[in-house]
Amino acid sequence: MSEPIVLYVDNHLLVLDKPAGMLSQGDATGDLSLLDWGKAYLKAEFDKPGNVFLGLVHRLDRPTSGVMVFARTSKAASRLSAAVRERRLQKTYLALCCREPSAAQGLLEDWLLPGRDGGSSRIVAEGTAGAQHAALRWQLLGSDAAGALCEIALLTGRKHQIRAQFAHRGAPLRGDSRYGADRPYRPGAIALHASRLAFPHPIGGGIIEVESTRTFPERADGA
């Protein structure tokens, strides 16, 4: 697993590029998380004594790579969390699908039932108890022997949303065996990458736009 990359830092924000395979936040495994890595980076970089505050405002699945923003102050954390709730934090992803979708672009809207205790999310009928509206826009960037490369703009942020919605339409992401992929990707990773974030600065208010510097897709095993 590669190291995280620092993309942006100021007195209020830390934006990191997460490698696939790293947790966003610590769990029962005790494995190093991006949140803990960020705290250690700030402590060393700015010679901070004692505990370092770093607020988690959104997450990426462990096998997913890409851009995440953290808050360096409680005020920034509160305002960034509000931006997430109000859909003012714009997320763009790249995905390499096992097969080409049925169209070159489109809007996907479904009702998604999130899995419990780490389980898979499912597309269900509207009105199903506990189901959440899930929407995204996508376009096909190209297709070759490795798969179909799509760019995705999330309109809602649901658990496993991209993975479940594309799999439901016969185009699961490479390496995502949980959702029916029959083609591998890199070990410990699925072919999903958060390539860009855009959001209002929690203090200044101006729009911050940060892009990943990682190459995607990385070499896909079995291509």
Image: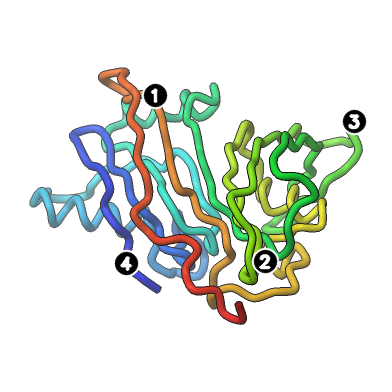
**Earlier residue among tags 1 and 3:** 1
Inspect the image, locate mark 3, and give the three-letter code of the amino acid beneath it.
Gly
Tags 2 and 1 in contact by the CB under 8 Å rule? no
Inspect the image, locate mark 1, and give the three-letter code of the amino acid beneath it.
Arg
Indicate the secondary structure of the residue bearing disc 4: loop
Q: Which mark is residue 127?
A: 3
Q: CA separation, marks 1 and 3?
A: 32 Å
- Rendered location of residue 24, percent (x, y): 45, 55
Inspect the image, locate mark 2, and give the three-letter code of the amino acid beneath it.
Asp
Determine which residue is flagged by label 1: 79
Q: Which mark is residue 151?
A: none
How busy is the neighbourhood of tag 1: few (under 14 within 10 Å), some, or many (20 plus)? some
Residue farthest toward the bottom in the current orientation of the protein = 222
* Mark in the foreground, 2 or 1: 2
Q: Which mark is residue 176?
A: 2
Q: Which mark is residue 3?
A: 4
